Amino acid sequence: MLHEILLSLSGQQSALFNFQTEEDVVSEEYFPLLSPPEKALLSSLARLSRLHTKLRSHTAQICSTHPSVISRAVSTAIRSHHLGAFQKKILEVEKAILLEDSGYVGGYGIVPLSTVVGEFSPWTRRLEWLWGIARFIQSSSNKETSQNCSGASLIDYLRGESQTGYVDIEEMALVLIDAAETAWMRQLSTWLLYGNLPILGQGDFFIQGASASEREGPTSVTQFVIHANLLPQFVSTHTAASILFIGKTLNIIRAKRGPSNGRAPDALLTSPVTLHSEHINHLAELKSPISASKLSTAVNSIRLSLSQSTLSKLLPLPKILEILSVLHDFLLLRRGEFATALVSHAATRLQERQRGPDASASRNVVPTSINALAIKEGDLATALTNAWVELYSLQNEEDTVDDELDLAREIVRLSLKSKERDQIPGIASEEAGAELVAETSSIPFDDLLFPTPTSLSVQVLPPLDLFLSASDISIYSKIHSYLLSIRRAQIRLGDMWKHTPLRRSFPSPWGPPRSNSRFGQARLRLGRERENARLAHMRAIWATNSASLFVLSEIGMFFQGEVINGSWQHFREWIEAGVSDTHSMSGSRPGSRPGTATSSKAHNPIESVSTGGESEEPNPEPATPIRHDPEALTAAHRRHLYSLVQSLFLTNTPFTEALRGLLIRIDHFIALVVRLESIQRNMDLETDEGVVDALVDYASEERDVSDALRVARADVEKAIQGVVTRLREIDDNRTEEERIMFELASNTHKSWSRTSANDCSYVPRKAAGVDRLLMKLDFGTATGN
C-alpha cells in the first residue's frame, strides 16, 4: 500500500484512491479491509494526489495556450519549482523508507501510516494555495477561458497573497512574484532600450499601438497609448508616462533617422543612441519584488540620459516655444485680428447660406435661431481660408514674412465636432489631461460661431506629440470656443452702432425749396414725429446694448489680459529660465548692458522671493543651470493648462451656464433689432416713396417685433444680473478655489527651481481675484452703464 500511496502522490493513476468522484475517498473495491481511522488518514493523501494531478494538467494547459507571457512564466514556476519540490519530497520519503530510516520505519519493518501523512500534511495548504493561483490565471472550465487574467492583475494578486501569516506561503509567493516580474521586466526592457513592443505577449503589455479611433492625426510614425487595465499597481502614473515617453522617443528617432543610405529629406542628424549599457545597468539594479520608487528612479535616469543626448536635437526648446506661441496666439486669441476675421467670415458664410436656395423662404418669421442651416466642412474651410487671407493682407509691407502665421496656416484646422471625435481615450498616458477634460463644464460654447458644433484644433505631428497630447488639444479647443463666443458677442454688439438708420434720421430730411412748401412742411412734421417716437423707443434698446457690451468687454479683458497673457508670460519665463541662467553663469550676455544690483535681483526671482527684501549671505556654491527636459516641460504645461481652466472659471458649471444664457439672449436680441431695422426701412419706403407690398403688414410686424424686443431686453438684463451674481459667488468661494488651484505644489517659494530629477516644480501664476472684475462692473453700474 505504501507503494500505491507514493505513486498516487507523484501524480500516477493508482487503484488506492477513487478518482471517479469529486470526493477524496479510498477505493473500497481494491482495499476493503481498511479500518475507518486508516481511511481518514488516507483521505488527506487522496486530496494531495488529486491536487497534484490537477495542477500538473492545468499548468501544462496554461503554459501552452495562455496568451500572457507573465502567466506562462508563473505557471512554469509552479511546475518546475513548487511541484518539483513536492516531487522531491516524495522521493526523500521513499528513499528513507527503503533505507529503513528509524524516523519512518519502526519495529518489524512496520511503517506507521500516520508518519507518512504527517510528512505531507504541510503540503496540503501549499497545494491548495497553488491551485487557487492556477484557477486565478485560467479557469478550469473551458467555457470561461475568455475570462483569463492579465499579467498585471496576476502580479497584483501575487503581491497581495504574499502578505500572509504563513512563512511557507510567503516564500512561495515571492518565488512566483520573481518569475512574473522577471517576465514583465523583459517586456519592459525591450521597450525602454529599443522602443519595440515585445514580440511575445504583446497584447498583455500595458503599452500598445494606437487604434484608428485613438490616433491623434495622420502620421507615418506609429502611435502608442497606455492601457490602464494592463498596468501593475507598483507602476505609478508618472512612471508609466515616462516609460511611454522613452519608447515613443526611440521610435521617433528610428523613424527620423530614415533609410540606411541617409538620403531622406527629414532624416534626423543625430548619432545613434549608445547608452544601452548604462540603461541596462539601471534596469539590472531592480530586484524582485520591484519597488515603485526604485523603478521610478531608474526610468527617470534613462529619460534624462536620452534628453541630454538626443532629445535636445529632436525636440529643441525653440520648437516647443514655437508651437506654444501658435496655440496662444490663435487658439487663445492673443491675435485679436484672427478672432475678428474668423467671426466676420463665419457670419458672411452664414448669410450666403441664408440667401441660398436651401434657406427658409419665409421672411415673416423672426430668425431667432439658425439651427435649420446645414453647415458642411466646405463652409468651415472657406471661412478659415478667408480669415488667413485677411491676416496676410494686414501684414506690414516692410516685413512680409510671418513664420508663425505660416505655421498656423499649416496646422490649425476648423472642423465639425462629432461625438466620436470629442471622446478622449481613457489612457494612463493622458490621465491628467483626460481628467481635466472631464472636470471642465459640460456647457457647450462651440455652436455659437456656427449653428453646428465646430472645433478649432491643431494638428500635432511627431515629435511634438511627445509634448502635446490629444487631451491637451481638446482643452485648448474648449478654451478657444469659450473665448471666441465672448469675443463674437462683443463684435456683434459693437457693430450695432454701425446701423445708421437706428441711431439718427437717415436719409436726411428735405431741405429748401421743397421744405418751404406746405406739403413739404407737413411731411417734415410727420417725419420728426416718427423719428422722435423711434428714438424714444430705441433709447432703452441702446442702453441694454451698451450694458451688455460693457459687461462682456470687462469679462473678456479680464480673461485675456489678466489670466491668459499673464499666465503665458509667467510660463514662458519659466521655460527660458535655464537659458538665462546659463548665460548669466558664463558672464554677461552679448550685447547686454552691465547689470546693477537692482537689475540682478529683478532677474533672480528665487532670491527676490526668498529674501523678502532683506539681505542674505551669498551662497559660495555656484548655481546649477536649470535644464528642462521635454517630459518636465510636459508636466509644467499641464499645470499651466490646469491653472488656465481654473482661472477662466471653465470648471464652474453655474457660471458657464449663466454666461451661455447671456450670449444666446444677446444673439436673439440683436436678431430682433436687425429685423426691426428692416421693417422700419420698408415702412419708410411705403410711406415716403409709395413702394407698397400688399402681402405684408409692416405696422403689425413692427408692433410684434417691438413687443418681442421688450421681452428680449428684459431677458438680457436678467441674464446680465445672473452672470454678475455667479461672479459674486465665485468671489465668495475664492479661498476654496485657490486652495484647489494651487495645491499642485507644496513649496511655492521654489517655483523657479527643480528640486529633483522627477519633480516638476513649476507653480502656475496666480491670477488676480475676481474682486477686481466685480469692482469694474460695480463702477460701470454707478456711472450709469
Image: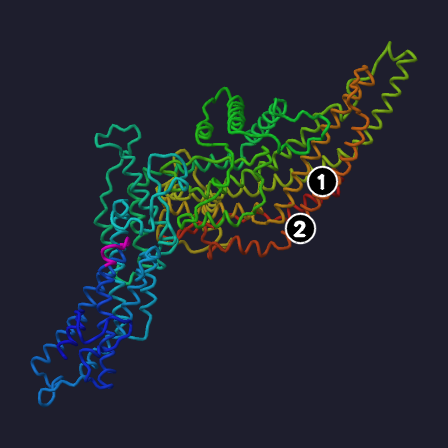
Q: Is residue 620 visible?
A: no
Q: Which residue is mark 1?
A: 716
Vertical side of 101 occupied by 273: above or below: above
Tell me which colouring the rendered structure shows: rainbow
Residue in front for this viewpoint, 232 or 743: 232
Residue 662: percent from left, percent from top: 67, 41
Decide if residue 202 is on the left or right side of residue 697: left
Decide if residue 152 is on the left or right side of residue 339: left
Q: Are marks 1 and 2 in contact (CB under 8 Å)?
A: no
Residue 623: percent from left, percent from top: 37, 50
Label 1 residue SS: helix
Residue in front for this viewpoint, 139 or 746: 139
Q: Quadrant of the C terminus?
A: top right
- Extreme residue toward the right, this view: 518
Q: Quadrant of the N terminus?
A: bottom left
- Extreme residue toward the top, this view: 513
Vertical side of 338 occupied by 151: above or below: below
Q: Residues within 10 Å of mark 2 (few under 14, many from 20)?
A: some
Q: Which residue is mark 2?
A: 728
Task: Kindly identify the amino acid type of the residue bearing the numbered disc 2.
Answer: Arg
Decide if residue 428 is on the left or right side of residue 330: left
Q: What residue range appears in magenta? A: 61-68
Residue 83: percent from left, percent from top: 20, 68
Vertical side of 20 occupied by 109: above or below: below
- Mark with earlier residue (1, 2): 1
Q: Residues within 10 Å of mark 1 (few under 14, many from 20)?
A: many
Quadrant of the rendered image containing residue 490:
top right
Residue in front for this viewpoint, 57 or 590: 57
Task: Kindly identify the amino acid type of the residue bearing the numbered disc 1.
Answer: Val
- Extreme residue toward the bottom, this view: 107
